[in-house]
Amino acid sequence: MLFKEDEIARAEANAIRTNVGWYRWTHDLVKMTGTDAERFLDWIMVNKIAGLAIGRGKYTTMLDENGGIIDDLMVIHKEEDVWWLSTLYGPHMVKWFDTHAEGFDIAYEDITQEIDMYAVQGPNSAATMNELIADAVDGLKRFQMIETDINGIAVSIDRGGFTGELGYEIYCAREDSAAVADAIAAAAAKYDASCLKTLEVYVRSLPMEKGMALRQDYRGLTPFEANLGWSVHMDKDFFGKEALEALQAEGPKHAFVGLEIERESYEDIAQNEIIRKRGVPVGICRQMIYGYTVDKNIGFGIVDARKVPIGTRVTIGPNDSPAVIVEPKWC
Amino acid sequence: MALLEHVDTHRGVETAFGKIIPEKEAYSYCLRTIAGFSANIFQVMRILNDDWEDRTSQICEIANMMNCAACSGSEEELFDYLNAFYDEWNIPELVKRAAWIGAIWGDYGDEAEDMAGRVIQFTEDRVEKELDTCPWDIVGSEMCNMTTAMFTANFDIAAGGEHGEITNDVALNMCEARGCGNPHCRVVAERRDTFGLEQQGWLDHRGAAHLPVHDTPPERRVKHAQGLRNGQYTNAFGEENSLEWQYNWVAQMGWVWSISFPLIAIRDMAEDDDEFERILRIVFATAGKNSFIDPFAREGLRNWLDIPREIGDNDPRVMGVYIQAMLGCQLVPYEFEAFDADGVEIRVDQETFTGRFEMAPLDEITIGYEAQWNGACHALVSPEWSVWIDEDDDDFIITVGRKVDDRAL
């Protein structure tokens, strides 16, 4: 939980918004190779993966046979016929591929234990990175990855992150992780920036303020219900498309919304707490957190799309905390 | 019918009189009865050992050791054990697992046990957990200390710099404990290297936290854990456990940590097994009698179980349906052999009756409940009726029948 009085968490959040901060950000990583890898990924993901240039990445969701989201991830075209899939659910992804890979000339493995990852985020992240690596990052486009080095240690760097700020992610071999962390710390120190230690600041608070959610928030929704319709290419074939089309024809059942509670804090609101409108259950809370940039207790919720428009006053949880439904983005 | 076998159709425990105890109520009752058994066991301990510090240290050491047993295998086995846990709970790589695993472990256990509350803080250096309720709050102060030894093990299993070494990387304090009269239970783990804290002994875990704590105001406290209020537990990483999963888990594990672990030390406090079992019977018999001393307790039971007025007070079925409700809520399969005015006979499988957690059967369950139910029967029904448990091949027969015993307890 985060509270408005937490000055350490506030300082960490403020560092990312106004200066720069860094932290270990290791995701599960699945490596896919093979001549059919591009074709398979283009079919199993809703976004258009075919034609993605080497050194570029793309955000996408992956659906089940019911058209519901089972993962959201970054697909990175690493080399010719080599792809990295950055997710928080590597073991689940491998199992899913196991049941759908027949007929494709592909190989895949969870390489999470081989690769560590760090994030450098904030307005001064580019300057920090330029202190750190051999090649300047100034011209790097969003989701573009380059191969470079830090003090002679081979690293892959992409422009991206999960804070809504300018930022970069550094991939390195596990055995080089400590040396890379030391180098980042030294470069960041020049901007008076230290390593963030409050998980909820960089996993939930900063992203949520910018409208960025996790798979656990979206799970089971269609990409359209999750406000991710922009990533769906209905002009291509993909797994779950038929079900998704049918659901689209029926119209959205759920809406992914923002929540603002009016009490000082949210100790009685866990994930999946029931949202009530005039005492009647109309949805569930996904996560509450304190946002230090907007200075509010904010959250995500999934509600009945027909009954709970933006602006609806609701209550959440066992003590009926008053709240209002808002757009799921605060800054 | 037992809930375990009919959960999909019944969603509750059906008694011999047709009363359905709803699933959530049955779950709560199950927890409280396990806690009640634990409270009796701790009374046995207090009789056997009158030195608070000594007995508390002994159960702490055992609880810590048993919780650490997970890392007693090879390094590879520990790695596999932890990885399976990470996968099951979707704990991603970005989490510094060594720092947080203890808190994640503790949180899902607390929630399954309806120790309702919240993780207040969850950082690399510090974890603070606050509970508003605890069904085990009747057991007493030694239990509160013992749980800190278990939590220490949870942190040590994954946090140790060296495999197999108990490194105590965190200072762990139960700053408040409901079992000692505080409004909350509050456990704070703080990294010793970060805050410059000393290594703790078994009796040093009830101190204050190094950093200030967050006290949730009464209006935002909760009465039940997520499972009972929302139908499932969801951890910080979005992984869910259903109410049914939690119920089945706690109906096994509640017996292990709160009874089986301390019993290892408590049995050793007695001169021999006979001495231990003599005191065990006395304590449980007294507890049973006192359950129904108050006239409203008997009426309350009749009301709770919808016992028809045609069934008089001096009828063995009153006791029989009480035992049935307890077995059903504790997810113990059973079968009636007799249920009439002449007596009640309930057949249970020995292994499932004593082995709530299959790997650690507890003979003390049979001895304890025989004494407790017999004592309760004398107060609830009348001294004309007794409860005893006989062996029948692989089964036990729990009987409520007439018995004259010139040396009755």
Image (tube, rainbow, N blue to C red):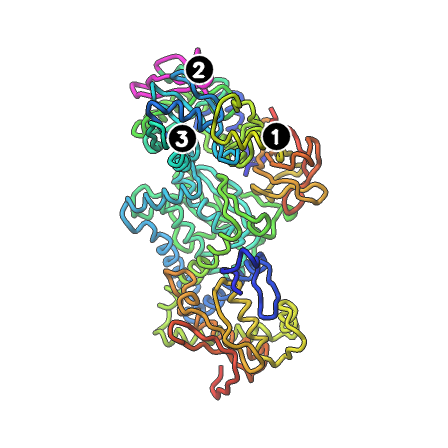
Where's residue A245, x and y in %?
A: 56, 29
Type of residue at label 1? Ala
Q: Quarter of the image containing the C terminus of chain A?
A: top right
Separation of residues labelled 3 and 1 (CA atoms): 39 Å
Residue B82 percent coordinates (x, y): 36, 44
Please identify the quarter of the rendering in which residue A284 is found. top right
Residue B61, above or below A157? below
Residue on which disc 1 sits: A249
The residue tagged 3 is A26
- Labels 1 and 2 in the same subunit: yes
Rounded to the nearest whole Å, what is the CA distance between mark 3 and mark 2? 22 Å
The x and y percentages for residue A64 are 49, 35
Instruction: Specify the segment rendered in magenta.
Output: A134-160
**Closest to the observer, B167 or B224:** B224
Whichever of labels 1 and 2 marks the residue nearer the N terminus, that label is: 2
In this view, the residue farthest toward the left is: B74
> Residue, x 43% and y 39% (percent of image)?
B91
- Pointer 3 chain: A
CB atoms at circles 1 and 2 under 8 Å apart? no
Left or right for A77, reference B215: left
Residue that numbered label 2 is attached to: A127
Between tags 3 and 2, which lies in front? 3
Q: Is residue A153 magenta?
A: yes
Label 2 is placed on what type of residue?
Ala
Q: Quadrant of residue A170?
A: top left
The residue shown at (63%, 73%) is: B298
**Residue B35 magenta-drawn?**
no
**Which numbered disc, 3 or 2, marks the residue that appears first in the sequence?**
3
Residue B293 vs A4, above or below: the answer is below
